[in-house]
Amino acid sequence: MKKRPSSMRHLDDAIRRACGGSAEEYVRTRTLIADSIVAHMLPDGVVKGGSAIKMRFGNTATRFTTDLDTATATDPDVYAERLAATLAKGWEGFTGRIVPREPAQPRGVPQEYVMRPFDVKLSYNGKPWCTVPLEVGQNEIGDAEVVDWVELEYAVDSLANMGFPALGKVPLMPLVHQVAQKIHAVTGGGDRVRDLVDLQLIAANADVDLAEVKRICVRLFAYRKSQAWPPDVVKGEGWDVLYAAQAAGLPVKPSADEAIDWTNGLIARIDGEES
């Protein structure tokens, strides 16, 4: 077994060597490792959003994201207290503390849907290492209580190359729920161009039950009451530039217009399923 890094500096040096000296790949790999360690320590609920897609499919097949998004049926303050206790106990030299941040105040979004933000301050062998922005959402239609327990192949490989044991399985939101949430987000206005990318990546890497997606979409859209099912993706201001940045280097449609057409086709296929 490889010798484990003895200090925070040696840990970062080991990650840099594994990334061939690439600064961009170092940031991506360190973020994936840090997110996975925090996910391993979660008291309950699931990891969702782009971070869950990255944990499932790895760095090379997904877009870069910094936030770790979760959903829980527990009161967010109690959730944070339980996570703080787990972080204090730590894992293989990694420990942490959780710091609340001020919630966003997005226009037109009911307060109960606003994610509760925290910073998880991770340390390694007692020295500050990195910060994981954590966003905690509520359990809406049981989506925080249905779990895909997934082995984090990509993070585990990176950790094993530095002498660490396997993390074990972590709780990810099932893809059928993720697809439904991303369709709702990208059709609700705003700048959620990243969901156009994520939906294509999910379709390319997994076989998702579209009939089950339709059942969940109907429930989610009825629960949130902000738009009707089935929706249409309508191009927003600045989407061409935003999409180009999010899609760079990934096996997805080359333009926002093509991605919108593809996503509207996906919605039509889902709506055509017998739920």
Image (spheres, rainbow, N blue to C red):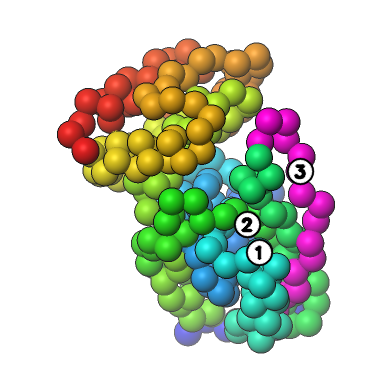
Along the viewing direction, whichever of 237 and 2 lies nearer the viewer: 237
Relative image position of residue 207 (x, y in whole percent): 25, 44
> SS at mark 1?
helix
Instruction: Specify the segment rendered in magenta.
Output: 93-109
209 w.r.t. 18: above or below? above
Q: Amino acid at mark 2?
A: Val
Q: State which tag comes first along the sequence, 2 or 1.
A: 1
Between 19 and 72, the residue placed more toward the observer is 72
Residue sitting at x 73%, y 31%? 107
Residue 235: name its quadrant: top right
Task: List the residue tagged with mark 2.
Answer: 136
Q: Which mark is residue 76?
A: 1
Q: Is residue 195 above or below residue 253?
A: below
Amino acid type, residue under disc 1 in the picture: Pro
In front here: 12 or 204? 204
Q: Is residue 183 magenta?
A: no
Mark 2: which secondary structure? strand
Earlier-in-chain disc, 1 versus 3:
1
